[in-house]
Image (tube, grey):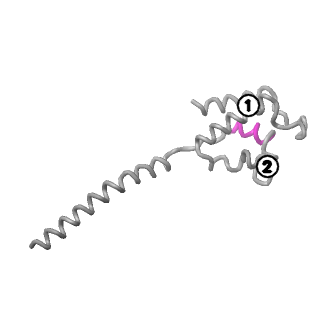
């Protein structure tokens, strides 16, 4: 009888320990998987495809694609997406992107810059 009590007590301790240690891990993993990423809206995507993706895309300029890759956007965590979007706004606003070597036809208009920056600002809220 004592042996049965010992076995039951041991099973109880193991069960409680499992609940205590596994529940926090499950909660953390659910938090990570429930976090969403931002999709690029069509109007922003059109501007980026015209002005940016010839370099910032899989198969584009290796250095440019390593800084920001349009093809990999949905794989970026939210924090990285918001930083990249802000950097895009800054780069098109100050004229550093697209570079002059890309050609004048790749330069976004003021309206297109506003589209990018409005979207980027909205991600930071």
**Secondary element at tag 2:** helix
Q: Is residue 122 left or right of residue 43?
A: left
Please give the name of the residue rendered at 44% of the width and 49% of the height, measured from the top-left corner: 28
> Can residue 43 be found in the magenta stretch?
yes
Image quadrant where one finds the C terminus: top right
> Dot 1 surroundings within 10 Å: few (below 14), some, or many (20 or more)?
some
- In contact (CB < 8 Å): disc 1 and disc 2: no
Horizontal and vertical percent position of residue 14: 27, 63
Query: Magenta-highlighted stretch: main secondary structure?
Result: helix
Q: Which mark is residue 63?
A: 2
Q: Residue furthest left?
A: 1
| On-image quarter of the N terminus | bottom left
Which residue corresponds to the image point at 18% horizontal and 67% vertical from the top-left?
8
Circle 1 sits in a helix, a strand or a loop, which is it? helix
Residue span colored magenta: 42-50
Q: Is residue 46 magenta?
A: yes
Q: Where in the figure is residue 2, as x and y percent of width and height?
A: 10, 71
Taking the spot 62% from the left edge, 37% from the top edge, the residue there is 82
> Which disc is residue 44 wearing?
none
On screen, 68 above or below 11? above
Q: Which residue lies under the disc numbered 1?
A: 90
- For residue 95, which quarter of the picture? top right
Between 84 and 20, the residue placed more toward the observer is: 20
| 93 shown above or below 3 | above
**Residue 25: image x %, image y %?**
41, 53
* Label 1 vs 2, first from the N-terminus: 2
């Amino acid at each position: 009888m004592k042996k049965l009590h010992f076995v039951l007590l041991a099973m109880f301790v193991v069960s409680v320990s499992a609940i205590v240690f596994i529940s926090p891990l499950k909660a953390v993993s659910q938090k990570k998987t429930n976090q969403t990423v931002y999709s690029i809206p069509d109007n922003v995507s059109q501007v980026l495809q015209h002005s940016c993706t010839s370099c910032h895309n899989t198969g584009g300029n290796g250095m440019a694609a390593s800084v920001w890759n349009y093809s990999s956007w949905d794989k970026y965590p939210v924090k990285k997406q918001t930083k990249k979007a802000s950097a895009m706004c800054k780069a098109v606003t100050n004229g550093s992107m697209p570079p002059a070597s890309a050609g004048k036809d790749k330069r976004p208009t003021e309206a297109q810059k506003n589209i990018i920056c409005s979207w980027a600002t909205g991600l930071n809220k």
